[in-house]
Image: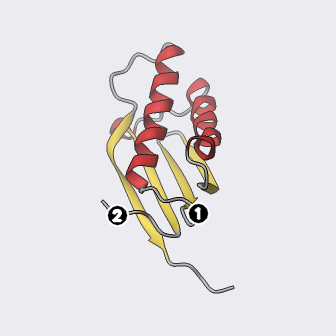
Amino acid sequence: MHHSEGIHRVTLFTAHHKPLLEGDLRVITEYGLKSLPTRFPGLKVVSHVIYPNRVELLLDFQKLDEDVLRVVQSFKAEVKTLAKKKGFSEENLWQWNYEDEWVPSQSH
């Protein structure tokens, strides 16, 4: 497993692409995103969009020596744990895999 460099475009889908990220689950997902830089100092959430069936993120790993998989797993686990505390009863919230695309840095 290699450490990430630069900007990554990450897309996480809900299980079976169900429109689950609405209401309380949307709020919990938002909270999980906001707490990511606290759990991974140096990580920057450049942008994010929460759709009912997926979360699209632009993450900056330039100041973080961590891999994308670990960050994604941590985020998904936190959201699922908080969702269960709120009464979310379905077995799976997230699809196992995710899309990750490295975005080459552009010279400024």
Sequence-wise, which precedes: disc 1 or disc 2? 2
Q: CA distance from mark 1 to mark 2?
A: 15 Å
Helix, strand or loop status at disc 1: loop
> On the image, numbered disc 2 is attached to which residue?
2
Q: Nearer the viewer, residue 97 or 1?
A: 1
Helix, strand or loop status at disc 2: loop
> On the image, numbered disc 1 is attached to which residue?
63
Image coordinates of residue 51 in percent, x first then y, are 55, 44
Query: In which image quadrant can residue 60 be found?
Result: bottom right
Query: In which image quadrant can residue 92 be found?
Result: top left
Image coordinates of residue 71 in percent, x first then y, are 46, 47
Residue type (three-letter) at the residue carrying disc 1 = Lys
Query: In which image quadrant can residue 62 be found?
Result: bottom right
Few, some or many residues within 10 Å of mark 1 (<14, 14–19, 20+)? some
Query: Which residue occupies 59% across, 33% down?
Result: 26
Quadrant housing the N terminus: bottom left
The vertical placement of 49 against 20, above or below, is below
Give the farthest residue toward the right.
Answer: 108
The vertical placement of 24 against 108, above or below, is above
Residue type (three-letter) at the residue carrying disc 2 = His
Query: Which residue occupies 58% across, 36% down?
Result: 32
Q: Is residue 21 left or right of residue 1?
A: right
Quadrant housing the C terminus: bottom right
